[in-house]
Amino acid sequence: MQEEVKLMKGNEAIAHAAIRYGMDGYFGYPITPQSEVLETLEELMPWETTGMVVLQAESELAAINMVYGGASAGKAVMTSSSSPGVSLKQEGISYIAAAELPALIINVMRGGPGLGTIQPSQADYFQATKGGGHGDYHLIVLSPASVQEMADFVGLGMDLAFKYRTPAMILADGVVGQMMEKVVLPPARPRRTDEEIARQCPWAACGKNGRKHRNVVTSLELESPKMEENNRRFQRTYELIKQNEIRFEEYYTEDAEYLMVAFGSVARICLKAIEEAREQGLKIGLLRPITLWPFPTAELQRLGAKVKGMLVVELNAGQMIEDVRLAVEGAVPVHHFGRMGGIVPNPGEILDAFNNYFTEAK
């Protein structure tokens, strides 16, 4: 079967991939730099071809609670937004996590805090990986570095959400959302029938023909011992995710004397910087976490035992660096280089930062 290759933005790829996945519903609200997700879905009109519901809600709060309702019925549902909008969704995300429901959340990050700028950022790392809402919960967090991964991670994220009955997030920076690249669109899947949903999701509040009882989906538990057991069950699920779902990529690490760590679009810029550095005789490798949660701690520990130092590069003031430092436990010096306010560094700036921190490498 011939591959279907298209030229499109990362945001557009998410919309196309959602339809092809067989998504039951999308509920969103416009905000730069992710508005093309909703706009593309409205242009493609999947309600006429696959039956997918596409709805622009009256607010971000309404959108996430519509996702909560759809997920409660066992439907494959998603939302997308950008940083301030995702902040507004945090209570709903916490409720969805506590109700043990699958859902997909897209965050195409812009600079903050507050309304900030409409330019790209990676400053929502803490919010996504530490649980931006209240309570002890985690999201599965996937970080795409290309338009192809924007498309691929829609199916992967939704599949993981159903597998573990927990929300998943695609955490993309504004560069990946707005840039255009060739993408191979995933094959189309049929939407599940109501009978399939009832069979695959016995926990869902969808009922069955001829049965009066309908499951009640809630995150409320008034008895403390039961609430503690709920939380212990959540933690067992998170441990299972950490055992099975850690994803990352490595470049030039076999002979590396130093390591750069970066995610999203910045990892691509770091790779170019590393290629230039190797032409100068500097043996630098790159680790790109793909799952920001669960984080590739063990791999960083392994690499920390063989390199002389690490440079963490991010579009923020220093967030992922905390997880890197926890992973290596002081075995090597770990430094940070970041730009904020929507400024994206070039490979030369990153190399200059590396040389400033590791003068002995020259």
Image: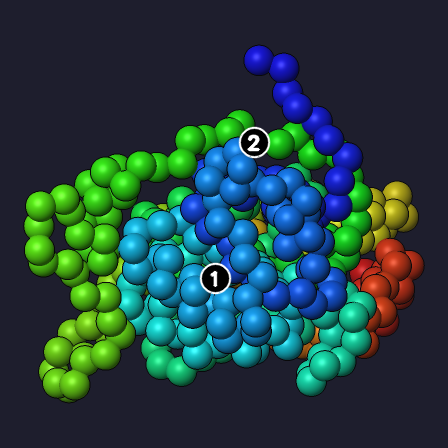
Regarding mark 2 in the picture, which secondary structure is present there? loop
Query: Of the residues under marks 2 and 1, which one precedes in the sequence?
Result: 2
Front position in the image: 237 or 68: 68
Vertical order, 257 against 325 (above or below): above
Q: Position of residue 330 (x, y in %)?
A: 55, 74
Under mark 1, the amino acid is Trp
Residue at image x 67%, y 65%? Answer: 30
| Residue 209 visible in this rendered orientation of the protein | yes
In the displayed orientation, state which residue is furthest to the top: 1
Front position in the image: 175 or 252: 175
Vertical order, 146 against 81 (above or below): above
Mark 2 or mark 1, which is nearer to you?
A: 2
Residue at image x 15%, y 47%? Answer: 208
Under mark 2, the amino acid is Pro
Marks 2 & 1, CB-CB < 8 Å contact: no
Quarter of the N terminus within the rendering: top right
Q: Is residue 143 left or right of residue 344?
A: left
Front position in the image: 213 or 278: 213
Q: Is residue 313 left or right of residue 49?
A: right
Residue at image x 79%, y 76%? Answer: 117
Residue at image x 47%, y 68%? Answer: 64
Q: Is residue 65 left or right of residue 271?
A: left
Q: Position of residue 20 (x, y in %)?
A: 53, 35
Quarter of the C terminus within the rendering: bottom right
Q: Which residue is mark 2?
A: 186
Distance of label 2 from label 1 (alpha carbons): 24 Å
Q: Which residue is mark 1?
A: 293
| Residues packed near mark 2 inside 10 Å, few (<14), some (14 to 19) or many (20 plus) | many
| Residue 306 visible in this rendered orientation of the protein | no
| Residues packed near mark 1 inside 10 Å, few (<14), some (14 to 19) or many (20 plus) | many
